[in-house]
Image (cartoon, rainbow, N blue to C red):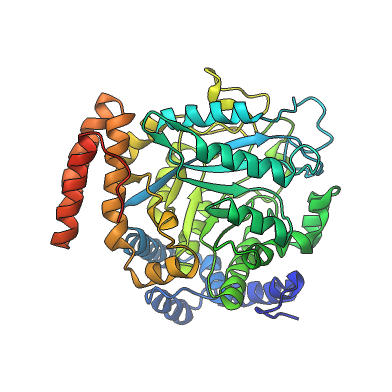
Amino acid sequence: MYDVKSMKAEEFINHDEIMESLRYADANKDNVELIDKIIEKAKLRKGLDHREASVLLACDIPEKISEIYNLAEQIKKDFYGNRIVMFAPLYLSNYCVNGCVYCPYHMKNKHIPRKKLTQEEVAKEVTALQDMGHKRLAIEAGEDPVNNPIEYILACIDTIYGIKHKNGAIRRVNVNIAATTVENYRKLKDAGIGTYILFQETYHKESYEKLHPTGPKHDYAYHTEAMDRAMEGGIDDVGLGVLFGLELYRYEYCALLMHAEHLEAVHGVGPHTISVPRIKKADDIDPSAFDNSISDEIFCKIAALIRVAVPYTGMIISTRETESVREEIIRLGVSQISGGSRTSVGGYTEEERPHDTEQFDVSDQRTLDEVVNWLMKSGYIPSFCTACYREGRTGDRFMSLCKSGQILNCCHPNALMTLKEYLMDYASQDTRAVGEKLIETELGKIPNEKVLSICRDNLKKIEEGSRDFRF
């Protein structure tokens, strides 16, 4: 039985409710009167429920899709402006005891070299990332209680925050590790993590169990209920995501929204981020073996409808996707992207990109500087800001600001100040020239004279050598 407030996975992600929602969507996908009503509701910027949003996803009326895309673009601007937050993944270990059939780190893969970074190697990776200009990391590790216990993860976080190299510093560490206990989530919270991210992979229980035949990840309920335990452990910000291509995308989309509704109903705050990865080629993984792959067109439609249905959430896309796909999907709703990423253990200290321990093939292989340059020339502000996290504006405090639109009063100048840091410390000559021009243009958009005055003063101080200003 469906119950949004239940703490049982099969009740808040209820198969019968999803199927009924999909039938309802199919019955109404050409119902223009209902579609218009749902779009009008979406214009209020309060979001849509899973059934309403499923109708829009099923709709294939060209002019209505165009209307949805325009609305998604406007909502993105209203909540996030033209800022794009930058981050990089850091792979700590590819030891894993699970048998996930879509991931090259699965236990039975005997020809992938297994590697785990020492604390000294973590420090070298972080130094390399700081030299690129990164301020925000997402750490990744396989599930292995012997090789990657929580103590190892905590030690790595401590090392990461402790590295200060030239003007570099990692100011926010997000964590993407396997589902764990409330006690371990408390330890992660105490270590000062930003967002706890866990991809569901698929919400379809039967498919989930087939895709995870062995290992602790086989337990569907334990995995699906992880966010509730994380929030019970005091973690304010959690990030959801499915791996599109494993199961039918309309099923996954509906369930993903149900999970967001559940978090909002139980904890008073929905997901801080939603990621939209698609299955990609990797060491011994062939994406064509999975028969639910989606086109670029459908992928962009999903992103637009996540933005419309969950307007406050940060949306993340990685370097799994090509430059052209990332360009389109950023316009439709994505607010965070990775740049200069390496998905192998120890990859950042290698001059040549290593492929033998990559979790997936990287489609966008541009450097961080090239990505920053491209974003600015496309009219976006690459932001290295971590101010909300460091000022305690997390969880419901961040969401209340974001939902009211007030977050823009501090985010815009913060983005400009962190971009200025990047330009002074790491940018190529061309990127710096483009950036300086962009900052001057964007300063003109700050309506509050006092904020503008402080921002200009801080930008001058950054030019003179000071760092780390924030509103």
Q: Is residue 463 visible?
A: yes
Q: x and y percent of residue 144 in the render?
A: 78, 42
Could you tell whether 29 is left or right of 250 in the image? left
In terms of depth relative to the viewer, which is nearer, 91 or 15? 91
Q: x and y percent of residue 205 in the render?
A: 78, 62
Q: x and y percent of residue 149 in the render?
A: 75, 43
Q: Is residue 321 visible?
A: no
- On the image, which quarter does residue 255 sit in? bottom right
Which residue is located at x 66 percent, y 29 percent?
118
Of the 4 image quadrants, the one containing the C terminus is bottom left
Of the 4 image quadrants, the one containing the N terminus is bottom right
Could you tell whether 435 is left or right of 89 in the image? left
Which residue is located at x 66 percent, y 67 percent?
228
Taking the view exactly as shown, the residue that stands out farthest to the top is 351
Q: x and y percent of residue 79 in the render?
A: 36, 63
In terms of depth relative to the viewer, which is nearer, 280 or 357? 357
In terms of depth relative to the viewer, which is nearer, 112 or 184? 184
In terms of depth relative to the viewer, which is nearer, 463 or 399? 463
Picture layout, residue 288 above or below residue 358:
below
Picture layout, residue 367 above or below residue 103:
above
Picture layout, residue 203 above or below residue 26:
above
